[in-house]
Amino acid sequence: MRLFFALWPPRQAAAALHVWANEASREAHGRVTRAETIHLTLAFLGEVDEEALPSVIGAGRGTGGKAHTLPIEQARWWKHNRIVWAGPNETPAPLASLAVELKRNLLEAGFELETRPFAAHVTLIRKACEPRGLPPLPAIDWPAAEFVLVRSVPSREGSSYETIGRFALDQK
Ligand code: ATP
Ligand code: MG
């Protein structure tokens, strides 16, 4: 199974980001992320044996984190992977801690993870050309009260996702 941990936006936030991405794609072209697949990746596991699933879930359960909100303050184009993304100007401290602790628990459980530092971003357009400009972002309300474990199933129109675990974040 191809697995990753993520923050998922509320439906309204996803809808607003999708509308923005459609608008931005007039400049950037590329493939706009469908509203229902918009997310922020916390840790990407890649291919994992089904027998290892309990230990993945254990690492999620063993990760404590604080509820926070994810500010969507900037939108950028990255040349190296040709995506347009949106995200915070600076990673909120509770989000950085969450990503670090989750990765540490997954490493301790024996999973291999990428070593690049966590970069909080929400991919909104893939295979994008460098845009001359991007439209202003709408106000987005994205409370992060839980994180999720997701199975990615590749398909022709872009991967589809199935949530297989939910992990609450502490409210205070
Ligand atoms: P598609 O590959 O069909 O365009 P996708 O990239 O969203 O869609 P996956 O490749 O399954 O689907 O990736 C799931 C999530 O994990 C995405 O947020 C993706 O950016 C991230 N991801 C994928 N591969 C890696 C990787 N090697 N390292 C870090 N994150 C990754
Ligand atoms: Mg991919």
Image: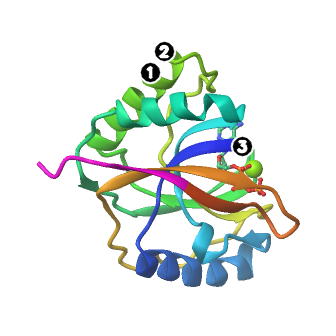
Q: Residues within 10 Å of mark 3 (few under 14, many from 20)?
A: some
C-alpha span from label 1 to label 3: 19 Å
Cβ of mark 3 under 8 A from ligand 1: yes
Q: Residue at x 39, y 63 (%)?
A: 73
- Check if residue 111 falls in the magenta segment: no
Disc 1 residue type? Arg
Outermost residue on the left side: it is 172
On the image, the x and y values in percent for residue 166 come to 42, 52
Q: Quadrant of the N terminus?
A: top right
Q: Is residue 165 above or below residue 161?
A: above
What is the magenta range?
164-172
Residue type (three-letter) at the residue carrying disc 2: Glu
Q: Which residue is mark 1?
A: 104
Residue at the image position 65 percent from the left and 51 percent from the top: 151
Figure colour scheme? rainbow
Pointer 1 with pointer 2, Cβ within 8 A: yes
Give the side of residue 87 with respect to residue 77, left or right: left
**Residue where numbered disc 2 is placed:** 108
Q: Residues within 10 Å of mark 1 (few under 14, many from 20)?
A: some
